[in-house]
Amino acid sequence: MIKGNKTKIRPLRKEDFPNIFRWVNDPGIMQFWYGRDKQRSMEWIKKHFTPAIEGKTDWTYWVIETNNKPIGYMCNTVEKDDDGEFIGKVEIDILIGEKEMQEKGYGPNALKAMINYAFKTQKAERVFLVPRLTNSRAIHVYQKVGFKKEGTLRHYEKFEGRWVDNLMMSVLKDEYKK
């Protein structure tokens, strides 16, 4: 378990699937997460997240809680070289799914806790994320917790039927202020 001032972050469990299903199918979240053209079924949720819970993928999924109530989830992965050795880079992503918990500081709090975990426990040198350029609210939060813009990744992914640009953002171990 990872603890922030306002949040605790624990590994995702199968019992969390109904919340994940509800969050990723919320139109307000879909416009930034998977896309409004990608309604997710419970079967998709199970197929996508179960291998990670069972340790069969490089991604780890976490549930963000406050007062023992799930409010969102995060994921992270450590990058490895061709020999399977960790190379010091950790990618993260975050979603606050409960609307009444958005814009109350839980996202930045959970991000700070995960960044600390990446640097202290996972021994990362660099933590990064890749938001879409159109997600200005998320980019603002990422900058607030210490991420710096590195550059635009042109036509990085297909989203809602068209190619979109994303932004590479990172924070380095020696520049991060806890």
Image (spheres, rainbow, N blue to C red):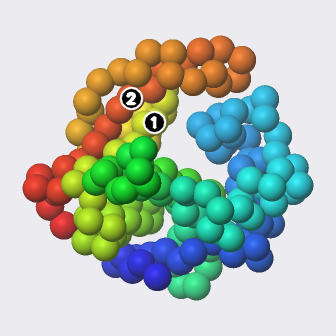
**Quarter of the image where the C terminus is located:** bottom left
Residue at the extreme front:
83
Mark 2 to mark 1 CA distance (whole Å): 6 Å
**Residue 98 in sight from this viewpoint:** no
2 and 1 marks in contact (CB < 8 Å): yes
Instruction: Please provide percent x and percent y for residue 55.
Output: 62, 68
Which badge, 2 or 1, is on the more N-terminal residue?
1
Please tell me which residue lies in front, 164 or 30: 164
The type of residue carrying mark 2 is Leu
Residue at the extreme left:
174
SS label for mark 2: strand
SS label for mark 1: loop
Are there few (<14), some (14-19), or many (20+) residues within 10 Å of tag 2? many
Q: Is residue 115 rendered to the left or right of residue 70?
A: left
The type of residue carrying mark 1 is Pro
Residue ID for mark 1:
131
Q: Hey, which quadrant is residue 17 in on the image? A: bottom right
Instruction: Please provide percent x and percent y for residue 126.
Output: 26, 50
Please tell me which residue is depicted at 68% across the width and 70% down the height of the picture.
54
Q: In the figure, 142 relative to 131: above or below?
A: below
Please tell me which residue lies in front, 135 or 61: 61
Q: Is residue 127 rendered to the left or right of residue 73?
A: left
